[in-house]
Image: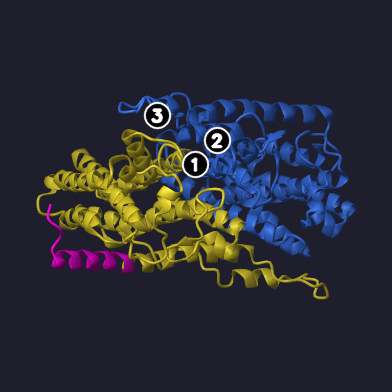
Chain colours: A yellow, B blue
Amino acid sequence: MASLQTTAVNDMQEALADVSESLERMMEQLLPQPEGVSSNIISLKDRNASAERSPVGGEAKVMEAMRYSTLGGGKRLRPFLVVNSACLFGVSREASLMTASAIEFIHTYSLIHDDLPAMDNDDLRRGKPSCHKAFGEAAAILAGDALQALAFQVLADPSVHPDAAVRCELVTAVAKAASCRGLVGGQMLDLEAENKELSVDEIIRLQRLKTGELFAISCEAGAILGKGAQPLRLALRRYANDMGLAFQITDDLLDAEGTREEAGKAVMKDSERGKATLVQALGIERAREQAQILARQAIRHLDVFDKKAGHLRTLAEYVVTRRS
Amino acid sequence: MASLQTTAVNDMQEALADVSESLERMMEQLLPQPEGVSSNIISLKDRNASAERSPVGGEAKVMEAMRYSTLGGGKRLRPFLVVNSACLFGVSREASLMTASAIEFIHTYSLIHDDLPAMDNDDLRRGKPSCHKAFGEAAAILAGDALQALAFQVLADPSVHPDAAVRCELVTAVAKAASCRGLVGGQMLDLEAENKELSVDEIIRLQRLKTGELFAISCEAGAILGKGAQPLRLALRRYANDMGLAFQITDDLLDAEGTREEAGKAVMKDSERGKATLVQALGIERAREQAQILARQAIRHLDVFDKKAGHLRTLAEYVVTRRS
């Protein structure tokens, strides 16, 4: 696969930016507003005015932490997948953006918890202090917890789909992707795997749990919303699996080569920490080849959609050619 | 209100034990089984046998931590409320036990996270080392996260109710109760309130968020499952609010008096930590009176159910007379 034409890269970046902007507005609406909450707490009728007291703004603090970590940053790859898979089935923009927001809330909560000192202990995220650095550990733990609850509240909302069975299917699929057999299991595996030698299969399995399951439901969500036939759902899951792994290998390559241009994320982090990556297991050249093979394979899964899945196709090429 | 007859206390304890046993079996089925998971991970085909390597059992560890904290302990008050409110509407035992399990998963996850060093820093829970003491902080954070996801997965399961709209309603109501305007907001308020002087209203508000919302949805869940009319749902919410607060005051009284017989939970903990309680704000005698008034008020809300809500009535008396 030759590297992408400059025009294709530009188109892709424009398409990503477009989803990001719409997503930002939707998440802004769905996230709780801290304004007014703390003032509620201060002005209670039998407040003892003589006692020295500062306002107790617990809820407002959690809400601010939720907004801080969710808004204004991130590649928004998962939302892009939701929106573009939903497009294949003629799903309304509002429904797909709500679903995309819910999945992004799950992703963000996992990043907040992953950054905690007891986990990966990262001080920076998306170019700014990580949630616990900005709000303290307790608020970060709780903001993550509240984001997870909010994700399911959004998915069960009638505006997502008039058919409640479809909403339940989304709740089930996202809950499974976020479960101890998905995202959470992958995070634990990742921590346990530090400084251990993992086989290629083990690393693939780890990645599939840690990032693959959420990629897969992001693609499948469109088919669920559009009541797509089973073979189409399966094709999207397969696309997601291959594209997700290609994305992860490229991430590891950028990390290993220390060429990541993006500010706000440390490079050479994984190897210093003794994290097993496919780049380490295969070497840079074979890993790069593997990413290309996976991207091509991902695109072939989209053949069932004929010409329709243009953005998803370009994305698979884009993730392996990006420089940040 | 005279203290409960010994026979009534015995009946209540028997009824609680009965729900506990059925719940335990249901949760045992719903929780993931760690067996077989780690062996999956060890026996991978291209494993380099010569390299020194220990099996990476990440998912199994999270699953064990989930089971450790959920099974074999706790008063199971919330499940008792679900089962007995569901009884009022002729809901099947399986549906009510599944719903009760989901709510107990939420409750357990909040206890696991609340016990973390960055939060309340408790080493003991239900008479045994708290989750992070037994499995480490990372596994405890992740086990809590996975329990929350599991709760919503269970609520969206068709076995809970044939009507998906009912399941969505449960997901919505539980997500709200667990949100930053419910449980999570209450936990943050509680942490922020340490060593601050709170008014009676502020303490009531804190308790309503921290424990009241989950009590309320536990009672309302039965009405949702049974498609109960709005006035009946409201009556159950009001019962839960008053009963929950009476329960909390009694908890604080037992803590302040240091008479808690139950092993495995430290007494005099709240005042040492500078936590605001109604006992502190009102004094022991007025707090005790208040608990009795609330219990009576809770029972009056059940008048709409005529004779049917026997267990819920007795529970309200029981929570203020218990000694542990």
**Residue visible at 24% across and 66% down in the picture:** A13
Q: Which residue is label 2 attached to? A: B66
Residue A252, numbered circle = none
**Mark 2 or mark 1, which is nearer the start of the sequence?**
2
Using the image as rendered, state which of residue A20 and residue B4 is in the foreground: A20
Q: Position of residue B226 (x, y in %)?
A: 50, 40
> Is residue A227 in view?
no
Secondary structure beneath label 1: helix
Q: CA distance from mark 3 to mark 2?
A: 32 Å
Q: Quadrant of the C terminus of chain B?
A: top right
Q: Which residue is label 3 attached to? A: B51
Q: Chain of mark 1?
A: B
Residue extent of the magenta highlight: A1-21
The reply to whether the C-beta atoms of the residues labelled 1 and 2 are less than 8 Å apart is yes
Secondary structure beneath label 2: helix
For label 3, the crowd category at 10 Å Cα-Cα, with few meaning under 14, some 14 to 19 and many 20 or more, is few
Q: CA distance from mark 3 to mark 1?
A: 32 Å
Most common secondary structure along the magenta stretch: helix
Q: Which residue is label 1 attached to? A: B146
Q: Chain of mark 2?
A: B
